[in-house]
Image (cartoon, rainbow, N blue to C red):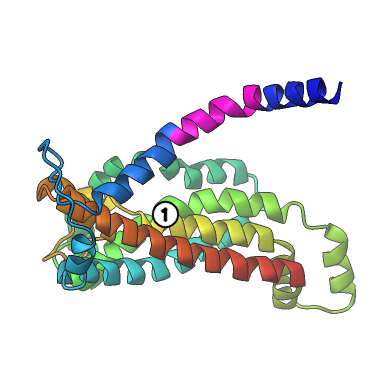
């Protein structure tokens, strides 16, 4: 009887978990395993001939200055974009959880960039930086609008940051709004009675109570920033002089333009390991803050 019950339980588990496991295997696990294999070959992505070269691609990476330069840009961009995206999203959430007649309309407006595709956003902002800012500069005479936004390495970096923050802040705003509305009002009332200032209530009550949302916000912003590709491709194409080339764009160029799929896959494997390590540390650290809160 027990054997029959156990078999039925396994059958039910296979019935419900099986399709999802099959899809995961085909879409995620199998391509990842193939990627590990191709990273150890010199395959160009087209030829039927695949030559095994072992760790040759990974040794090549050690002297690939372009790859490490793109890593440096991605690290700087991620650090700035993660902080600003979460700060702006949190600030918008604080403002739009107050009683405002147009708060629902404003929430929709700030969330709207997430509905537009990354490539399209890049082309829109390219027009704004090149044509729109030039017109505003002629009209106002402000030097801010007359900067070579996409023609200089420094300003191009900040142009990519501006577009990234503008795109992601609205999404994080929704997460922070959902978390802020769940903070008990009694805590704020008790703190006000005790004479706590607005800043004290923010740092002693609000932020500790929404740490789970901050964990999610940091994780999402990290993954977005590390994987940024489409916006940079359409906005700067990695220029000027590869100064805004992200790791994802470098991998794409190596694999599909230089026809070095084996080397490109090796870069992707290294990139995956670095990103996985950083995100695990981030989640571990912020989860500890949740427990302390």
183 displayed left or right of 173: right
Residue at 72 percent across and 68 percent down: it is: 208
Count of all numbered marks drawn on residues in the image: 1
Which of the 4 image quarters holds residue 54?
bottom left
Residue 286: give x, y in percent of width and height: 62, 68
| Front-lying residue, 84 or 262 | 262
Which of the 4 image quarters holds residue 20?
top right
- Residue identifier under label 1: 224
Judging from the image, what secondary structure is the residue with disc 1 in? helix
103 displayed left or right of 74: right
Residue 1: give x, y in percent of width and height: 86, 20
| Front-lying residue, 113 or 77 | 77
Q: Is residue 135 visible?
A: no
Classify 29 as above or below 223. Answer: above
Is 108 magenta? The answer is: no
Q: Is residue 212 visible?
A: yes
| Majority secondary structure in the magenta region | helix
Residue at 56 percent across and 58 percent down: it is: 217
Residue 119: give x, y in percent of width and height: 27, 42
| Front-lying residue, 189 or 9 | 9
97 displayed left or right of 231: right
| Front-lying residue, 69 or 32 | 32
Classify 133 as above or below 23. Answer: below
28 displayed left or right of 253: right
Which of the 4 image quarters holds residue 77?
bottom left
Q: Which residues are magenta?
A: 14-25
Quadrant of the image containing the C terminus: bottom right
């Amino acid at each position: 009887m027990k054997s029959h019950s156990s078999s039925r339980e396994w059958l039910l588990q296979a019935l419900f978990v099986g399709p999802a496991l099959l899809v995961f295997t085909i879409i995620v696990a199998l391509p990842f395993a193939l990627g590990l294999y191709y990273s150890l070959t010199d395959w160009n992505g087209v030829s039927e001939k695949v030559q095994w070269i072992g760790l040759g691609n990974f040794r090549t990476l050690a002297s690939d200055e372009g790859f490490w330069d793109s890593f440096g840009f991605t690290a700087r961009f991620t650090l700035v974009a993660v902080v600003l995206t979460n700060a702006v999203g949190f600030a918008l959430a604080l403002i739009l959880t107050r009683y405002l007649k147009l708060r629902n309309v404003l929430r929709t407006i700030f969330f709207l960039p997430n509905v537009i595709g990354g490539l399209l956003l890049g082309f829109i902002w390219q027009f704004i930086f090149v044509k729109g800012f030039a017109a505003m500069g002629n009209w106002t005479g402000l030097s801010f609008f007359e900067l070579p936004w996409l023609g200089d390495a420094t300003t191009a970096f900040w142009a990519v940051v501006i577009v990234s923050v503008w795109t992601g802040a609205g999404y994080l705003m929704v997460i922070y709004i959902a978390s802020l509305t769940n903070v008990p009002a009694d805590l704020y009332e008790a703190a006000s009675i005790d004479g706590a200032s607005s800043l004290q209530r923010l740092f002693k009550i609000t932020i500790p109570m929404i740490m789970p949302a901050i964990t999610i916000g940091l994780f999402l912003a990290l993954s977005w920033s590390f994987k940024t590709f489409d916006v940079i491709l359409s906005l700067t194409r990695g220029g000027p002089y590869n100064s805004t080339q992200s790791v994802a764009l470098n991998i794409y160029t190596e694999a599909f333009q230089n026809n070095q799929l084996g080397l490109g896959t090796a870069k992707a494997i290294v990139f995956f390991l670095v990103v996985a390590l950083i995100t695990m540390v981030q989640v571990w650290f912020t989860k500890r803050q949740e427990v302390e809160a």
